[in-house]
């Protein structure tokens, strides 16, 4: 079994993640089946048929949670949340009564994978979308999944849903996404899971060179592409929001904290305070996942008490750059019943 890192498990506490040969390489072999409007892969878009299984701990899964909320798909695509920690077998539904997902009736996400592919040997990863009638996983191709929510599920978008992946901006969005994935989203893992000093230093330099590039790009514009929020902002945000809580210390990404990078810190606060972003973030689960599961990096399993989260609510001042967060659309409404993050796991606990 592998988690969001793509690394194999070798012990019950979580596994071995560091590559003793040096550089971390992510396993990117995913189930490429797509859920589309025309159902060409055998899975047509239908309300109430599928369940998105995610974990608030995982940055890749958090993208799907944010996009689903921004587009207003809560009433047509249900959400199952695995707990923040897992063993070598699978993500588990230990947050639910009896330790079972209330819709799928399973204890481990592994069961949905095995229902479609008995003996499945690749990563049991989140996010995954499961076909409720059969209990079988449909896809775990996280990069395509969020794009399909924007392009294939349009019949069920809420009124005023933003255009996160507009046709006229797709080439630029993809250009930005490619370098952000390689150097930042995956770059923090290449730092944290490096097995040699040389591999770590290469990853470290590449990460901070790209963060400097992003700071320069965002100094004069509010969002990464155009003047509205797009898929590119969602993908960068889920790494930035974890930076000081996890990556700075746990993954040794410590040239600077996010709070010491003025442009990116203001940009991240701007997004955090935008409905659909910060209201999906559970800092407690984020920290518990990394510090408990990665026992070869943190053998004690001790979870840090910090950092202070109150700064996420400070004014960001980025309105002065203009921009329209939702374009011609509107913000999403209140968080759906049963999906709110516990306040004690958020910056609002200090208020």
Image (cartoon, rainbow, N blue to C red):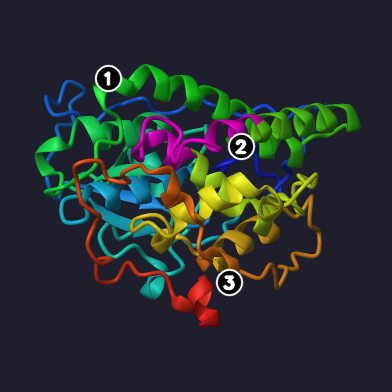
User: Left of 118 or right of it: where is 208?
Assistant: right
Residue at x 30% of width, y 60% of height: 105
Element assignment for label 2: helix
**Number of numbered discs visible in the structure rendering:** 3
1 vs 249, nearest the viewer: 249
Marking on residue 310: 3
Tag 2–tag 1 contact (CB < 8 Å): no
Quote the CA–CA distance across marks 2 and 3.
22 Å
Mark 3: few, some, or many residues within 10 Å (few <14, many ≥20)? few
Mark 2: few, some, or many residues within 10 Å (few <14, many ≥20)? some
x, y percentage for residue 332?
24, 56
Q: Answer above or below: position of 157 versus 277.
A: above
Mark closer to the chain start, 3 or 1 = 1
Q: Answer above or below: position of 56 versus 46.
A: below
Tag 3–tag 1 contact (CB < 8 Å): no
x, y percentage for residue 310?
58, 71
In magenta, the rendered stretch is: 213-235
320 vs 265, nearest the viewer: 320
Tag 2–tag 3 contact (CB < 8 Å): no
Q: Answer above or below: position of 351 versus 31.
A: below
């Amino acid at each position: 079994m592998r988690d969001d890192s793509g690394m194999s498990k070798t012990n019950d506490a979580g596994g071995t993640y560091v590559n003793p040969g040096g550089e971390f390489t992510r396993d990117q072999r995913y189930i490429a089946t797509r859920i589309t409007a025309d159902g060409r892969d055998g899975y047509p878009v239908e309300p109430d048929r599928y369940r998105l299984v995610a974990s608030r701990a995982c940055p890749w899964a958090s993208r799907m949670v944010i996009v689903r909320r921004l587009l207003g798909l809560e009433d047509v695509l249900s959400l199952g949340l695995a707990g923040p920690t897992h063993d070598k077998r699978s993500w588990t539904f230990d947050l639910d009564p009896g330790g079972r997902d209330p819709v799928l009736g399973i204890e481990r996400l592994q069961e949905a994978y095995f229902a479609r592919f008995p003996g499945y040997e690749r990563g049991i990863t989140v996010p995954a979308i499961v076909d409720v009638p059969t209990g079988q996983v449909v896809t775990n191709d996280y990069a395509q999944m969020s794009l399909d929510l924007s392009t294939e599920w349009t019949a069920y978008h809420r009124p005023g849903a933003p255009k996160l992946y507009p046709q006229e901006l797709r080439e630029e969005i993809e250009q930005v996404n490619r370098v952000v994935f390689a150097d930042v989203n995956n770059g923090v893992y290449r730092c944290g899971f490096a097995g040699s000093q040389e591999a770590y230093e290469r990853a470290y330099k590449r990460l901070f060179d790209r963060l400097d590039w992003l700071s320069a790009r965002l100094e004069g514009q509010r969002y990464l592409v155009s003047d509205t929020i797009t898929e590119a902002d969602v993908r960068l945000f889920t790494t930035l929001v974890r930076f000081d809580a996890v990556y700075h210390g746990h993954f040794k990404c410590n040239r600077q904290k996010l709070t010491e990078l003025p442009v990116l810190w203001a940009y991240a606060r701007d997004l955090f305070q935008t409905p659909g972003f910060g209201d999906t973030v559970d800092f407690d689960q984020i920290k518990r996942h990394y510090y408990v599961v990665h026992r070869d990096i943190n053998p004690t399993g001790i979870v840090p008490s910090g950092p202070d989260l109150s700064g996420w609510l400070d004014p960001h001042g980025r309105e002065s750059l203009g921009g329209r967060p939702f374009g011609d659309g509107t913000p999403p409404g209140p968080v759906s019943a049963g999906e709110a993050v516990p306040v004690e796991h958020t910056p609002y606990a200090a208020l």
